[in-house]
Image (cartoon, helix red, strand yellow):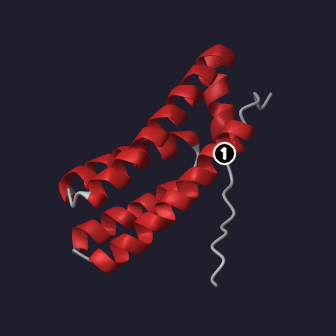
């Protein structure tokens, strides 16, 4: 059985930037909202895929990319971009694989941010 375990790391420098720009309270608010949005986008991506709603899937994953990038979740950003590339090329087999990977990396990323949510000061 293939063990699918990828290391997901939080870009602490990106979070430190948020805390510096927005202050502790503002950054915590942004991080919490971003976590909620990421979880929502991942759930929507699963639904869109199950319903073969390709345009909606692409739109949702593109917005996930923007949020993940803001949070410094580089692996999540990269995998989500791979999902969009599969959609754009019409590669349904690749889409199934990369979307599964997106779900795994997404869940781990949410956990990583939640656990690393202490101010980096």
User: Which image quadrant: the C terminus?
Assistant: top right
Residue at 71% in and 42% down? 12
Q: Is residue 65 left or right of residue 54?
A: right
Q: Position of residue 55 (x, y in %)?
A: 19, 54
Residue furthest bottom in the image = 1
Residue furthest right in the image = 121
In front here: 39 or 68? 39
Residue at 32% in and 51% down? 47
Q: Position of residue 75 (x, y in %)?
A: 56, 59
Q: Position of residue 17 (x, y in %)?
A: 64, 32
Q: Position of residue 3 (x, y in %)?
A: 66, 77
Residue, disc 1: 111
Q: Bin the neighbour count of mark 1 within 10 Å (Cα to Cα): few under 14, some 14-19, many 20 and up.
A: some
Q: Is residue 44 left or right of residue 72?
A: left
Q: Is residue 112 left or right of residue 37?
A: right
Q: Secondary structure at mark 1?
A: helix
Residue at 76% in and 30% down? 118
Q: In this rendering, is residue 62 above or below 120? A: below
Q: In this rendering, is residue 4 above or below 44? A: below
Residue at 67% in and 37% down? 114
In front here: 117 or 42? 42
User: Which image quadrant: the N terminus?
Assistant: bottom right
Q: In this rendering, is residue 22 above or below 120? A: above
* Count of picture labels: 1
In front here: 119 or 83? 83
């Amino acid at each position: 059985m293939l063990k699918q375990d990828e290391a997901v790391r939080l870009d602490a420098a990106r979070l430190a930037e948020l805390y510096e720009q927005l202050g502790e309270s503002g950054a915590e608010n942004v991080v919490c909202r971003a976590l909620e949005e990421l979880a929502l986008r991942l759930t929507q991506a699963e639904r869109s895929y199950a319903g073969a709603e390709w345009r909606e899937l692409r739109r949702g994953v593109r917005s996930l990319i923007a949020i993940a990038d803001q949070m410094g979740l580089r692996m999540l950003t990269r995998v989500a971009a791979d999902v969009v590339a599969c959609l754009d090329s019409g590669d349904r087999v690749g889409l199934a694989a990369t979307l599964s990977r997106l779900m795994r990396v997404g869940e781990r990323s949410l956990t990583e941010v939640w656990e690393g949510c202490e101010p980096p000061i």
